[in-house]
Image (cartoon, rainbow, N blue to C red):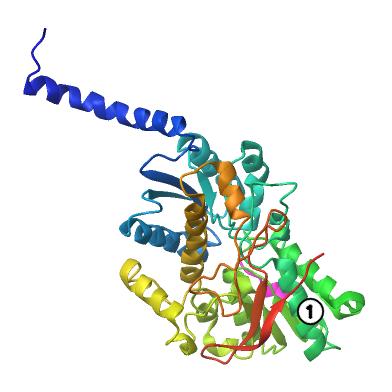
Amino acid sequence: MKRLTRRTLLAAAPAALAFAPIFAARSARAKGYGPGVTDSEIKIGNTGPYSGPLSTASPIPKSMAAYFKMINDQGGVNGRKINFISDDDAYSPPKTVEMTRKLVEQDQVFVIVGATGTPTNSAIWHYMNQKKVPQLFVGTGATKWDDPKGHPWTIGWQPNYQSEGRIYAAYILKNKPDGKVGVLYQDDDFGKDYLKGVSDGLGDKAASMIVAKASYESTDPTVDSQVVEMKAKGIDVFVNTAISKFAAQAIRKAAEIQWTPLHVLSGVGNSVGATLKPAGLDNCNGIVSDFYLKDPTDPRWITDAGFKWWVSFMDTYLPVADKSDNGNVIGPSLAATLVQVLKQCGDELTRENVMKQTASLHDLSLPMLLPGITINTSPTDFAPIKQVQMGRFDGERWQLFGPVLTGAVG
């Protein structure tokens, strides 16, 4: 019999280490875990716009990563650390498809969570459902994500754009019932959802009130010409549903040409850091929008327990990040929703159980959700957040007003 020496053991060690992942995967399969899950790890995937026209939203995946690091530092979820793999898709649907296939087929992630953008998520929607890989809490409010029967592996998170559009319409009918409305929207499902919501909300008056429907492409350099044309048409109610880059451009151009309509800015573009500061805070005075999360620039939250937690989280895990950027509020809130789902899964970490638990969230409260707004889902309800509150910018910060609202769709 050959004697085992220290040299032989050292020589065998690399080979043993090489087989360790294989043994772990076999053990996980034997225990019935889904892909990407072992006794010590849960592999989570994400695509985000770290570059491209929506790069202002990159704080969302960055702050998600920071939140998962915090969870890992606290011991993980049910003893498992989260391995968060987030790839840049540049807000380009073909790139999203490429990165998602890599995450699912090569990295073998358990789920994909918080991928940002309507056109990008649309590009992988059918693929994810064909593969039966959970596409959780997508970073877009398109109404179509609430389709548990047709697409049971995909679920939204934020208030949907059509319901927001209906709420804007109700505000317009109350405050400017004879207004001439112009809608700036992105020429895809994202923008058309907002447009439909406004139109449906105005009801029989839509045909006479909506005077201009101005679209743009995400690859356009500016929306200046659309803004100039709206002023020329006598528009006195401007519904600005653009992403931050173009929303800021529209605000700046309106100020430059001294156009002062009732300006309704969508929830997508109301971040102080990503939109209003680039547009110039003085140019934003009087703009109204809707909110479901606490505005990090609003001093009313200084003594709020949830806000204090968020500030502590930011100071510890994202110390140089911009606290005025709403993306740094969205990211940890999205991540916290997933962590709750994983906790509810316990040791039954299968993709099927993830979807079951995702559809079983009841009155989930998060630190940065506005008071009175909670997350609720069911097997027939894949729209977790359904409520908002209106706010008006006073030149320095958003001032909330009125009750918590729900814009019913359907």
Span colored in magenta? 221-226
Q: Is residue 358 above or below residue 294?
A: above
Give the vertical position of 28 relative to 322 (above or below): above
**Residue sitting at x 77%, y 74%:** 166
Q: Identify the residue at horizontal 49%, vertical 34% (top origin).
A: 32
Residue lying furthest top: 1
Q: For this rendering, which residue is in front, 273 or 158? A: 158
Neighbourhood count class around disc 1 (C-alpha, 10 Å): few under 14, some 14–19, many 20 upward: many
Quarter of the image where one finds residue 155: bottom right
Taking the spot 47% from the left edge, 85% from the top edge, the residue there is: 301
Q: Is residue 369 visible?
A: yes
Residue 28 image-quadrant placement: top left
**Which quadrant of the rendered structure holds the N terminus?**
top left
Number of dots carrying numbers: 1
Q: Position of residue 332 (x, y in %)?
A: 46, 65
Q: Is 168 displayed left or right of 103 in the figure?
A: right
Position of 218 compared to 38: left or right? Answer: right
In the image, 347 versus 181, the foreground residue is 347
Residue 213, above or below 157: below
Which amino acid lies under the numbered mark 1 shown in the image of this protein?
A: Ala
> Picture coordinates of residue 105 (x, y %)?
51, 35
- Is 182 inside the magenta-drawn segment? no
Q: Is any atom of residue 188 visible in this view?
A: no
Q: Residue placed at 49% from the left, 89% from the top?
A: 300
Left or right: 210 as drawn, with respect to 403: right
- Determine the secondary structure under disc 1: helix
Find disc 1 in the rendering and name its residue.
169
Across and down, in percent, residue 170 comes to: 79, 81
Point out residue 299 in the picture as x, y percentages from the top left corner: 46, 89
